[in-house]
Image (spheres, coloured by chain):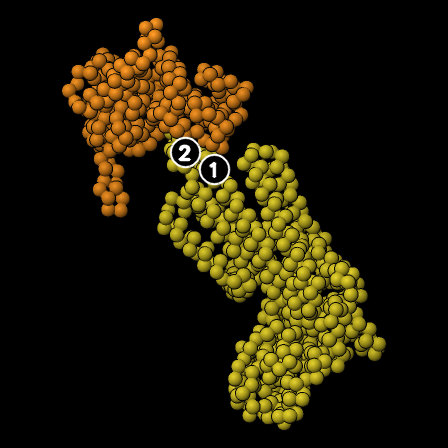
Chain colours: A orange, B yellow
Amino acid sequence: MSVTSPLISFEHVRKHFDGGRGAASVLAVNDVSLAIAPGEFLAIVGASGSGKTTLLRLANRLIAPDSGRIAIDGADIANVDLIALRRSIGTVFQSGGLFPHMSVADNIGITPKLLGWPAAQIAARVDELMTLMLLDPAIHRDRLPGQLSGGQRQRVSVARALAARPHIVLMDEPFGALDPLTRDALGEDYRDLHRELGLTTLMITHDMAEAMLLADRIAVMRDGRIIAQGTATELASVDDTDVDALLQTPRRQTERLRELLPRNVAS
Amino acid sequence: MNLWSDPRWGDALTHLPDYLGQHVHVSLAALALGLLVSLPLALAARRRPALRGALLGFASVVQTVPGLALLALFYPLLLALAALTARWLGFGFSAFGFLPAMLALALYSMLPVLRNTITGLQGIDPAILEAAQAVGMTPRQSLRMVELPLALPVIMAGIRTAAVWVIGTATLSTPIGQTSLGNYIFAGLQTQNWVFVLFGCAASAVLALIVDQILALIETGAQRRSRFRVVMGVIGVVLLIAAALMPSLSRARQSYVVGAKTFTEQYILAALLTQRLQAAGLPATTRGGLGSSVIFNALESGDIDAYVDYSGTLWANQMHRTDIKARDELLADLKAALGRQHITLLGKLGFENAYALVMPKARAEALGIHSIADLAAHAGKMSVAGDYEIFSRPEWASLRKAYSLTFRQQRQMQPDFMYAAVAAGEVDVIAGYTSDGLIAKYDLVVLGDPKHAIPPYDAMVLLAPKRENDSALRDALIPLLGKIDIATMREANLRASGSQSAADVAKWLWEKIGAKGPAH
């Protein structure tokens, strides 16, 4: 990692929000520096209010930092064409963020359409992605998001993020609202895609187990700061009670499950 | 008589294409203009709270102005504006009818459209807006592809409300010269033709419902992505526009327009003039229910070609004279003054419709009241009723001054109701009209005016400046001059306040005066 230059880098980034009506202002991101290498899958883990979602929104400049520098491929995103930047990055939202009045196909094809792809090429890409995300185009193409299950909606959301062949995908708790089975399957499917397509993924989650199963590297956030980062193994050696507590949960669950399900573990 | 076999239904039906067409015409134009102004304003205001507050405040204030007053206000406003453009830019425009009605109605349509558009756009889930940004939409693309489609149901609801309001309020545009379904209502109220009133109300209600349903069809079509519904709705709108243009197409040939003010006698005389023109082979139509000051300006600017006015009214209202002159002198002055505006005073019809103080004959005799001079001693204990304008007219001031009249109470009433009111003792005296047939019917007496405080009100035919040298028009109307005496006019008015239509009474009137032989 030290050899290749990072694809996404945060350097001493700060962002505060006004409290409004006399309330104190909140420093959501406090002097964060972070580098994500090409092809890396980085998960940012933290409790709600730790500033992780703000960090993600800074990455495609949905919000601008107060100070510090955010660069993609070495270029400060404060100086690039914002619209082009966002079209080159895939984004998956917590609740899907699908446009409720557009069909599944129109949702998936939106960024290619904005980029001016020919209609036939968009249609082919939509079918390709739906198949990839295990959605039957013949059945789901013309449905509205409201007619889909939660898992299907999130598959559409991932397909939409990938439609314009981005190199970078930002995901904000993409699988958080799904039932465990769907969540596991979709996470695995995405992990494969990430590898096959050579994506660089920045994923927000509050679930350490999910982060450890999917990501190459994990950054832990608390009160706007990154308090630790590294692989699961590296994190285990960090001397911090919060990091410890975050790791404790999956560890305890694993042991408990091992006791409850001896046969499965044995096989 | 069976309500449905009333011949006035048939009469009402013959006016329907014209009234309905013009009603749709002015309503749709107003709605289109209102949308054209409101929608961009709402879009501009959605991210500017100060502008938003100002706009909604302004639109709410407009809404509190009664529809009739708003329409009435636009007339003098445009008149002044037309005078300005004529002076500075070299062209004027008609401040009569369509333009003021459309502008006032457009203003009236703004509140629901503004409010619903702003509310609709504000109600969109912020997560969706953020997603629109994140997939790479420009603000304009986000508005067009996401925000407007999502706010559409709320915006359409506002448009539908506006449409229903405009169609309902358009019935009030009759007094400023815009033909509408309100012509039924105003004419019906004046001549106590309840069939007309009912017909006008029902027609505008049905029209409002139809337009509402057509818009609903487009709305649900857009929502459910049903091309069929949208196409049906658009076809409905196109049909409406076609219906609105039909009468103006058929009226393309030059036609004489005879104006009528808002009371029975005027409707009869306008019908009479129109019938005479038609009998002479001249195409002619009637524009009824015009306000007393609107009608003179309409003649002056050529929006109507002829109407009947009264010498005293013109003397006081148009010439702004408060002095009282002898009849012939006043008429000569008037003719000269009108001549300077190129308005032709064709001549007197023969009767006078003066304002007069009227009270029950029996009561007057019991109190020994023969003239207004006798009344003055009793007036302090009496109430007086008059039409909507008499108490603010200069004649009333001069009457009070001449006789030192002070009444205990003044009330305004619908003219046709005040005779019954004074006969029943609800009021003591009324400011009635000398030509009204109800004076004889209710056994009332007209009090004398020994000091000549009230000017003469000879009914006379006026022609528009553009018809100054129109001999065909003159020849068609001259046979009426000097032919209608007060008794005949009273009887005609009495007939029209019964179940006869103004047109029928006009025919009766012509037979009666035509029997005396032509004037020349």
Chain letter for the residue marked with disc 2 in the picture: B
Task: Tell me residue B402's x, y (percent).
Answer: 55, 89
Quarter of the view holding residue B103: bottom right
- Tell me the amino acid under the disc marked 1: Leu
Q: Are marks 1 and 2 in contact (CB under 8 Å)?
A: yes
Task: Tell me residue B40's x, y (percent).
Answer: 46, 45
For disc 2, the neighbor class at 10 Å (few under 14, some 14 to 19, many from 20) is many
User: Reading the chain from its start, which is encountered first: label 1 or label 2?
Assistant: 2
The residue sitting at 59% across, 64% down in the picture is: B176
A114 or B334: nearer the eye? A114
Residue identifier under label 2: B128
The residue sitting at 33% across, 32% down in the picture is: A62
- Tell me the amino acid under the disc marked 2: Ile
Quarter of the view holding residue B519: bottom right
**Residue A37 visible in the shown view:** no
Q: Are marks 1 and 2 on the same chain?
A: yes
State whether residue B150 is above or below residue B76.
Answer: above
Task: Tell me residue B281's x, y (percent).
Answer: 79, 63
In the drawing, does residue B448 fall left or right of residue B90? right
Disc sitting over residue A264 in the figure? none
In the drawing, does residue B303 fall left or right of residue B410? right
| SS at badge 2 | helix
| SS at badge 1 | helix
State whether residue B497 is above or below residue A45.
Answer: below
* Separation of residues labelled 1 and 2 (CA atoms): 10 Å
Chain letter for the residue marked with disc 1 in the picture: B
Disc sitting over residue B150 in the figure? 1
A247 or B226: nearer the eye? A247
